[in-house]
Image (tube, helix red, strand yellow):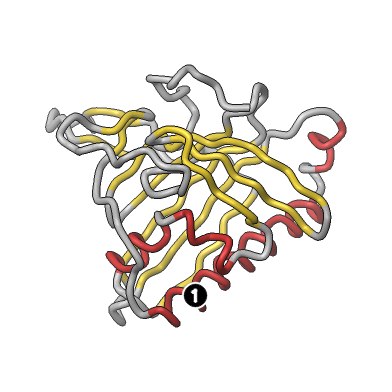
Amino acid sequence: MVHEDDGGQAAPNTPGTRTYGDGDGDGTTHRRPLRERHVEETVEVAVPVRTAYNQWTQFKTFPRFSAVVRDVVQVRPTVTEWTIGYGPLRHRFSVEILEQDPDAYLAWRGLEQHPTHQGEVEFRPTESGGTAITVRMLLRPRGTAKVLTRSRRVAGLTARLVRGELMNFKHFIEGLGQEGGAWRGTIRNGRVQHDTAEPPRSRVAQWPVG
């Protein structure tokens, strides 16, 4: 279920939380990535950063290449509802984008009553003119599943799933050669910035969603 509270401030240890100043008084904004994680996977794609970022943030296209994502619906400008599944099994959940920097970074958290995960993805240019995409995730399951995430075997399975999805995206975007859409706005602490026009709300998921 989706929470109606927009969550104006990110929790202190969530990805994307900002700190200001680095001891030299320049007032620079610094990203604070996940302090701990269960999964970190990177893949290089042979398209420029702008192309890779723009396509990644078109979440409506995830079912076209993903092995597990079945549907994505936009709920609010920074919230999407995802349906994932394998075979006849289905699981639906909502996530909120906390931070978004075009061509660089986005961070999200689950919006379940007891959030089960949070994550971030970074986009970096490579020397060859392509893009290195890194996904990091922290799992926060409850009950017996909490014990399972401490198992190296379970963490390994999750990492392989994430890497498989990254490889699927790589083949997808390299096959397209160009993005199928874009929204170039910025999000801070779960809110679209005032100098960025919010996209129209639609039952078809378009960025910024997550």
Vertical arrangement, residue 36 with respect to residue 40, above or below: above
User: Which residue is drawn at the image coordinates 81% and 47% (left, top)?
Assistant: 151
Q: Residue 6: x, y in percent?
A: 43, 21
Give the residue furthest to the left. 26
Q: How many marks?
A: 1
User: Which residue is drawn at the image coordinates 27% and 65% (left, top)?
Assistant: 50
Give the residue furthest to the right. 144
User: Which residue is drawn at the image coordinates 32% and 61% (left, top)?
Assistant: 181
Q: Residue 102: x, y in percent?
A: 27, 51
Residue position for label 1: 172
Which structural element holds mark 1? helix
User: Which residue is drawn at the image coordinates 78% and 58% (left, top)?
Assistant: 86
Q: Quadrant of residue 129?
A: bottom left
Q: Residue 169: x, y in percent?
A: 51, 69
Going by the image, does 181 lie left or right of 63? left
Label 1 amino acid? Answer: Phe
Going by the image, does 13 lie left or right of 51? right
Q: Residue 54: x, y in percent?
A: 33, 60
Q: Quadrant of residue 191?
A: top left
Going by the image, does 100 lie left or right of 166? left
Circle 1: is it few (<14), some (14-19), or many (20+) Cα within 10 Å? some
- Quadrant where the N terminus is found in the figure: top right
Vertical arrangement, residue 146 with respect to residue 100, above or below: above
Going by the image, does 24 lie left or right of 147? left
Camera-side residue: 104 or 204? 204
Give the residue furthest to the top. 5
Camera-side residue: 167 or 61? 61
